Image (tube, rainbow, N blue to C red):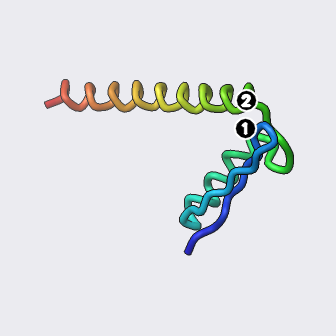
Amino acid sequence: MSKKVSLTVNGSRFDIELEDAFAQYLIKQMKNDFNTDGNNDAKTLLYAYVRKNAELFKQEEEITAILNNFNLQE
């Protein structure tokens, strides 16, 4: 099944259909980054994008460190 997720940016509403499990996860995350009941400006969108990429960067560094530890133990 799918669920519609919506976000308003600069007065334009964007709706996307997502798989239920991912939609629930995304809605929870969006509530941390956006005004899910109102309008968001481009600056808010940019900051959320940068924050999420910083999180991904940190995760990738941690995964690389873990993999390097496994390789050293062999």
Above or below, 68 against 8 in this view is above
Q: Based on the displayed image, in which of its 4 quarters is residue 64 positioned?
A: top left
Q: Which amino acid type corresponds to the residue marked 1 in the rendered image?
A: Asp
Q: Earlier in the sequence, mark 2 or mark 1?
A: 1
Which of 71 and 59 lies nearest the eye of the viewer?
Answer: 59
Residue projecting furthest to the bottom: 1
x and y percent of residue 17 in the render?
Answer: 59, 63
For disc 2, the marked residue is: 42
Which residue carries the number 1 mark?
33
Residue 8 x %, y %:
77, 46
Q: Is residue 49 left or right of residue 36?
A: left
> Badge 1 local density, few (<14 within 10 Å), some, or many (20+)?
some
Name the residue furthest front. Answer: 12
Left/right of residue 29 with respect to residue 37 in the rendered view: left
The residue shown at (85%, 50%) is: 37
Pick the front one: 30 or 15 = 15
Task: Residue 41: name its quadrant.
Answer: top right
**Left or right: 44 with respect to 53?**
right
Q: Nearer the viewer, residue 46 or 32?
A: 46
Q: Residue at the spot x=60%, y=25% of the render?
A: 50
SS assignment at label 2: helix
Count of numbered badges drawn on the protein: 2
Horizontal arrangement in the rendering, residue 50 relative to residue 37 (left or right): left
Circle 2 or circle 1, nearest the eye: 2
Seen at 68% across and 58% down, the residue is 5
**Which residue extends farthest left?**
74
